[in-house]
Amino acid sequence: MKPEAFEPKILAFCCHYCAYSSADLAGSMRLQYPPNVRIIRTPCTGRLETEYFMKALEKGADGVLVAGCLEGGCHFIEGNYCAKRRVDYIRDLLAEIGIDKERLRMVNVSAAMARPLTEIITDMVETVRKLGPNPLGAARTNPTLETA
Ligand code: FES
């Protein structure tokens, strides 16, 4: 029996005003991106706490994408700057515990950037596919991988 190929699960937090609209536009334009991504719409990326990123990884996501408005374009003034600081903090924390920081990324897009967003999503899926299953999620689902 052939082993199943690894299909990464990516969780994408998209802000309502730009990234989510861009993803919606991608659908209207019939642009394709891998079906590995589950999008969660958030009012603003500034609404996302650091624990959301860790929780997503602990609960089995192989990668987390945070997509907000362009810098200077946040509808809540500085929400995307707050999100960037939080994402950078968790990326550093992931590196410290031996998990590749590329599993968490933040990008900035406008509502009209449907094509770049599909490229970003595709690149994220391919990057995480190369990294393999998230060790945090794998440990959760496979007790033999858990540390004492
Ligand atoms: Fe889009 Fe703040 S409203 S990142």
Image (tube, grey):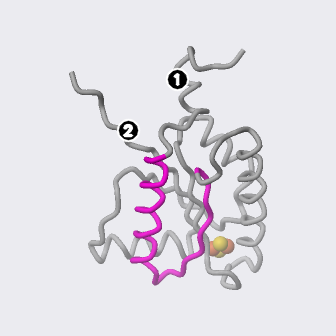
Type of residue at label 2?
Phe
Residue 85: quarter of image: bottom right
Write the residue at 72% across / 66% down: 84
Q: Horizontally, is 69 left or right of 47 in the view?
A: left
* Residue 138 to residue 142: above or below: below
Most foreground residue, 89 or 112: 89
User: Does dot 1 land on a helix, a strand or a loop?
Assistant: helix
Spatial CA distance of label 2 from label 1 is 15 Å
The disc placed on residue 6 is 2
Q: Horizontally, is 98 left or right of 26 in the view?
A: right
Residue 25: quarter of image: bottom left
Residue 137's x, y, as percent? 56, 32
Q: How many residues crowd around disc 2 within 10 Å: few (fewer than 14), some, or many (20 or more)?
A: few
Residue 96's x, y, as percent? 77, 43
Magenta stretch in the rendered image: 103-130
The disc placed on residue 141 is 1
Residue 30's x, y, as percent? 26, 72
Q: Earlier in the sequence, mark 2 or mark 1?
A: 2
Q: Horizontally, is 36 left or right of 40 in the view?
A: left
